[in-house]
Amino acid sequence: MTRRASGRHWFGWSLAALAAVGGGCGTSNEARAGAAGAAGRDAAGAAGAAGAAAAAGRDAAAPDGDAGRGGGDASFGGAAGRDAAAPDGDADARVPEGTPVGDFGAVGDGVTDDTAALASALASGDDLVFAPGHRYLVRGPLRIDADGEQRLSGEGATIVTDGVIDRLFVVDKPSGTLRCRDLDVDGERRIGGAWLLKSAFDFDGCDVRALYSESSNAIAYQLDVARPMGDATISNAVCDSIESKANGVIGDGPGAARCVYVRWQTTAPVTVRLTGSTMGNVWGDDGDVIHIAQENDVYDAPTRVIVKDSELFYGSRRVVKNFSSNTYWENVTFRSVEPGHPKLGGAVSAGMVVTSVHSGDNVSNRHVYRGCTFIGSARERRAIISAVDDVVFDACKFVGATFAIYRSGGGVCFENNQVDSSFEMYDYTTEPPLFLGPIVEVNTTPAGDYVNFSATPPAPSGSFECPRVVAEP
């Protein structure tokens, strides 16, 4: 194994050599990014520090049973109080505009069946207003497919059921954007999927809790991007306690659970944004908090995912499964679950944050992790890349976490990061690694001997430059 001191260098090359070559650092299916060959490698060294506070202070308590949040999978935070007062004393600033859903016959007492009333309201295409704090009981799926712009002012209302619903909302508008504010879904372990989204949307404070599926998958927000459409945004959301029944099968069908699942099936220039959100407690044989899948395997498409100012934690298999290109992560905390958690069951970990390709002999590129915090545990510590060429880790913190290349990867610019004594950079595979490009480290603190690659990466060439400034796309 080759070990070199960390500091300001490319592994095996001087900084002067870097300056001479000139911009741009320039991707895997389940098997590629799986845990094969790495079992037990990172078992030592539990994460010792608490993570960054949750986004915007909405849910600053620690996740899942830690102080302030309650035990088990208790929900944490919600719309109540989020807009309790209008800004600057303007009493009219929060007065919603639209037709009350009560005009269509919806009662919202948590007992009356409001399915037909809400279906009629949504089909009208009107902007709709829910009664503050009411609970609307439904017993079947609701479609939102009226043409044109539409607003849902939830006012802290919650959708519930007393039956079993596979998918609650299906959004498929021919044109226009669905804008939803403060409308929550409490599955009470009776709803499998909260939102199936096939057209443009803008959600602010639309929380999802307690989803469960015995026969399918459990997904809070599923984005099927199959055609050109407007952008998609989720802001200030809580996603908590998403679970699919363990069935001993690893995959993305039955047994999978997700908070956010983005399925790229188009090459249109669509951007998905997630900001100011707290998401976690995702359980099952295949539980990922966020999963991004380039299902068309077109990795030079102008599709983008931008995640900022959020906390993502406790996925039974991974925190993030990033099998796409063009992703940007800023001020995001990733936190692995500790071993022995009662919800883990027999789930096998496959990495904390995994960046790779969806399938085939492809290469993923254009990923930036800026100002992020990676908090490992004794169960899982790895930020993994596989079949990736062009990734930047800038001004991040690694707390009980490591960086690993599985089988192939390169084009890595690792700059201005803080690490602890358990950190290392290494590869793991049954064969010598295939380096797809150089691996450059600049200004890691504290300086130390962290590098443990089994072979020497190639020298920088062409337009490769590190450090570099990468703005939000």
Image: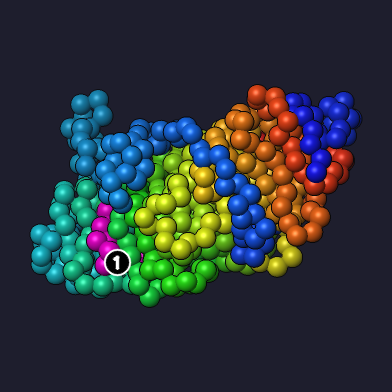
Please tell me how crowded label 1 is: few (under 14), some (14-19), or many (20+) other residues with Cα within 10 Å: many
In the rendered image, residue 213, in percent from the top left (x then y), is placed at: 35, 69
Q: Residue at x 69, y 31 (%)?
A: 415
Query: Would residue 472 be seen by someone viewing this image from the given angle?
Result: no
Determine if the magenta segment contains residue 12: no
Query: Would residue 132 be seen by someone viewing this image from the given angle?
Result: yes
Q: Residue at x 40, y 36 (%)?
A: 55
Apparent side of residue 103 relative to residue 257 in the rendered image (left or right):
left
Q: Looking at the rendering, in which quadrant would you find the N terminus? A: top right
Apparent side of residue 393 relative to residue 280 in the rendered image (left or right):
right
For badge 1, the amino acid type reads Ile
Determine if the magenta segment contains residue 186: yes
Would you name the residue on which mark 1 appears? 191
| Magenta extent | 184-195
Apparent side of residue 462 relative to residue 467 in the rendered image (left or right):
right
Closer to us: 42 or 390: 42
Relative to 233, residue 176 above or below: below
